[in-house]
Amino acid sequence: MKKLLTSILAAVALCFAATSCVTVTPGYGILGTGAVTPGVSMNKKGEASARFLFGAIPMGNADYSVSKAAENGGIKKIATVDTKTVVFDGIIFVTKTTIVTGE
């Protein structure tokens, strides 16, 4: 039991030491534009988002697909597909969003 407690305390101390110099930012984001279909108007917009813990562990429904974004916007013909990633508290909370425009 004492060995287990020592191991846990050592792991916690290592975590504190590794994160002591981390700067916490209020949030930053990246917006990327993917596919563009010529000849399709962009009068409708649909979005689908998912939140992740540490950028990999889904928090709730993680469906941020193109088809879900098109469904949310009532889009039948897709003109553009964009992605947006917003990071809060270093990399602890990440929100990924797919943005679709079309008719």
Image: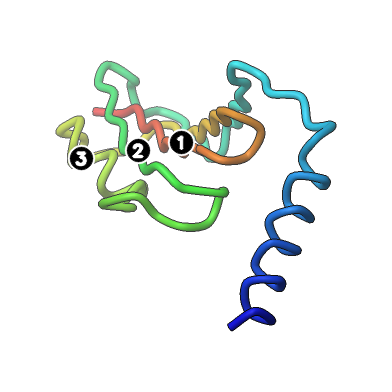
Q: Is residue 49 left or right of residue 56?
A: left
Residue found at x 81% / y 47%:
18
Q: Is residue 60 left or right of residue 57?
A: left
What amino acid does circle 1 point to? Thr
What amino acid does circle 2 point to? Ser
Mark 2 or mark 3: which is in front? 2
Image coordinates for residue 32, horizontal then vertical, percent: 60, 31
Q: Quadrant of residue 19?
A: top right
Residue, disc 3: 76
Q: Nearer the viewer, residue 103 or 101?
A: 101
Q: How is the image coloured?
A: rainbow
Q: Is residue 83 left or right of residue 27?
A: left
Q: Is residue 39 above or below residue 77?
A: above
Secondary structure of the residue carrying tag 1 is: strand
Choose the circle earlier in sequence order: 1 or 2.
Answer: 2
Secondary structure of the residue carrying tag 2 is: strand
Image coordinates for residue 34, horizontal then vertical, percent: 56, 38
Q: Are marks 2 and 3 in contact (CB under 8 Å)?
A: no
Choose the circle earlier in sequence order: 3 or 1.
Answer: 3
Secondary structure of the residue carrying tag 3 is: loop
Q: Are marks 1 and 2 in contact (CB under 8 Å)?
A: yes
Mark 1 or mark 2: which is in front? 1
Q: Quadrant of residue 102?
A: top left
Graded by Cα atoms within 10 Å as few (under 14), some (14 to 19) or many (20 or more), the crowding at tag 3 reads few
Residue, disc 1: 95
Q: Nearer the viewer, residue 15 or 88?
A: 15
Quadrant for the N terminus, please. bottom right
Residue, disc 2: 49
What amino acid does circle 3 point to? Lys
Q: Is residue 82 above or below residue 53?
A: above
Q: Nearer the viewer, residue 10 or 87?
A: 10
